[in-house]
C-alpha cells in the first residue's frame, strides 16, 4: 500500500526529475500543458518504481536542461513530450 509519505517522496522526485531536465511543472500546469490528473498519475507511476536509489544518484549529478530523463524513469515519455513542446 502506498502511504502519504511515499506519495510525498515521489512527488518530490518527479518534480526534481522535471527540474533537472529543464521543466517547471508549475509553469507547465499554468500554461495548460499538464493537467492535475496527469501530475497525479505521474506521481503514482513514480511510486511504483523500484529505482529510487538510481534516481537520486542520477539527480545528484545536476541540471541537464533539454536532456532526456534516464531510461529507468517511468515518466520519461511524459517529460520528453513536455520538453518537445517547449522547443
Image (cartoon, rainbow, N blue to C red):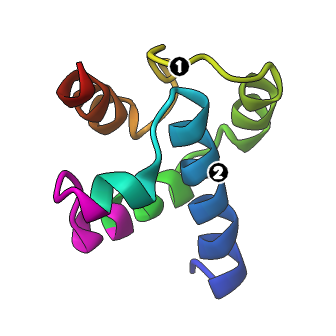
Relative vertical location of residue 23 with respect to residue 58 in this rendering, above or below:
below
Q: Position of residue 80 (x, y in %)?
A: 31, 25
Q: Quadrant of residue 38?
A: bottom left
Element on which disc 1 rests = loop
Q: Nearer the viewer, mark 2 or mark 1?
A: 1
Circle 1 residue: 65
Which region of the structure is painted magenta? 30-40
C-alpha separation, residue under disc 2 versus residue under disc 1: 16 Å
Q: Is residue 40 left or right of residue 47?
A: left
Residue sitting at x 42%, y 38%: 74
Q: Quadrant of residue 81?
A: top left
Front in this rendered view, residue 22 or 5: 22
Query: Mark on residue 2?
Result: none
User: Of helix, strand and loop, which one carries label 2?
Assistant: helix
User: Where is 2 relative to 44, above or below?
Assistant: below
Residue farthest along the bottom direction in this orientation? 4
Q: Residue 12 vs residue 42: left or right?
A: right
Q: Position of residue 51 (x, y in %)?
A: 66, 37
User: Alpha-carbon neighbours of circle 1 within 10 Å: few (<14), some, or many (≥20)?
Assistant: few
- The quadrant of the picture occupied by the N terminus is bottom right
Image coords of residue 76 (percent x, y): 39, 30
Q: Residue at x 44, y 16 (%)?
A: 66
For residue 10, side relative to residue 26 (left or right): right
- Residue 13's disc is 2
Q: Residues within 10 Å of mark 2 (few under 14, many from 20)?
A: some
Amino acid at each position: 500500500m502506498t502511504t502519504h509519505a511515499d506519495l510525498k517522496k515521489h512527488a518530490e522526485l518527479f518534480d526534481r526529475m522535471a527540474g533537472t531536465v529543464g521543466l517547471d511543472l508549475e509553469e507547465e500546469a499554468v500554461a495548460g500543458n499538464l493537467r492535475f490528473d496527469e501530475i497525479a498519475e505521474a506521481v503514482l507511476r513514480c511510486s511504483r518504481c523500484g529505482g529510487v536509489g538510481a534516481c537520486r544518484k542520477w539527480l545528484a549529478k545536476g541540471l541537464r536542461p533539454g536532456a532526456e530523463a534516464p531510461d529507468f524513469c517511468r515518466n520519461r515519455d511524459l517529460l520528453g513530450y513536455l520538453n518537445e513542446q517547449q522547443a
